[in-house]
């Protein structure tokens, strides 16, 4: 993981962007009063977003499964469409 302070990143922004892309590592940008941020490549960000959505989806399925196995839920007849 890369770490740099705001002033250094601002003065050499392109170089830090290139490092994030080349190493595929996040860059922690430190700021006053611990208002730090993280810079990541678009590929890494997309991957993190996908993982978060998948985790939410799995949690939803798990809750539904527990509800059904504990006697919850409602049974319906299937409707046939011609």
Image (tube, grey):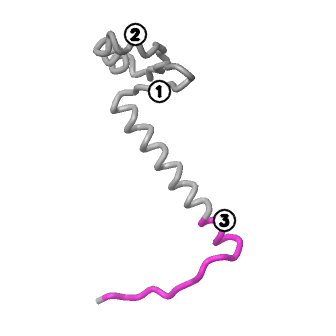
Q: Residues within 10 Å of mark 2 (few under 14, many from 20)?
A: few
Q: Position of residue 8 (x, y in %)?
A: 40, 10
User: Distance between the Cα atoms at labels 3 and 1?
Assistant: 38 Å
Q: Residue at x 46, y 49 (%)?
A: 53
Residue 36 or residue 79, whichever sits in front: 36
Magenta-drawn segment: 64-81
Single out the residue that lies furthest toward the front: 33
Q: Residue at x 39, y 22 (%)?
A: 24
**Residue named by callout 3:** 66
Instruction: Decide which of tag 3 and tag 1 comes sooner along the chain.
Output: 1
Q: Position of residue 57 (x, y in %)?
A: 50, 55
Vertical order, 77 against 23 (above or below) = below
**Residue named by callout 2:** 8
| Residue 18 picture quarter | top left
Q: Is residue 79 magenta?
A: yes
Can you tell which mark lies on residue 2?
none
Q: Is residue 51 magenta?
A: no
Question: Mark 3 and 1 residues: CB-CB less than 8 Å, in contact?
Answer: no
Q: Secondary structure at mark 2?
A: helix
Q: Residue at x 46, y 20 (%)?
A: 29
Q: Main SS of the magenta segment?
A: loop
Q: Residue at x 40, y 27 (%)?
A: 40
Vertical order, 42 against 53 (above or below) = above
Residue 25 or residue 70, whichever sits in front: 25
Q: Secondary structure at mark 3?
A: helix
Vertical order, 19 against 76 (above or below) = above
User: Distance between the Cα atoms at labels 2 and 3?
Assistant: 51 Å
**Residue named by callout 1:** 37
User: Distance between the Cα atoms at labels 1 and 2?
Assistant: 14 Å
């Amino acid at each position: 993981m890369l770490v740099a302070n705001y002033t250094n990143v601002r003065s050499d922004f392109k170089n830090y962007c290139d490092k994030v892309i080349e190493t595929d590592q996040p860059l922690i940008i430190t700021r006053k009063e611990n208002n730090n941020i993280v810079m990541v490549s678009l590929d890494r960000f997309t991957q993190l977003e996908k993982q978060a959505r998948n985790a939410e989806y799995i949690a939803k399925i798990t809750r539904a499964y527990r509800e059904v196995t504990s006697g919850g839920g409602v049974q319906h007849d299937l409707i046939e469409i011609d």
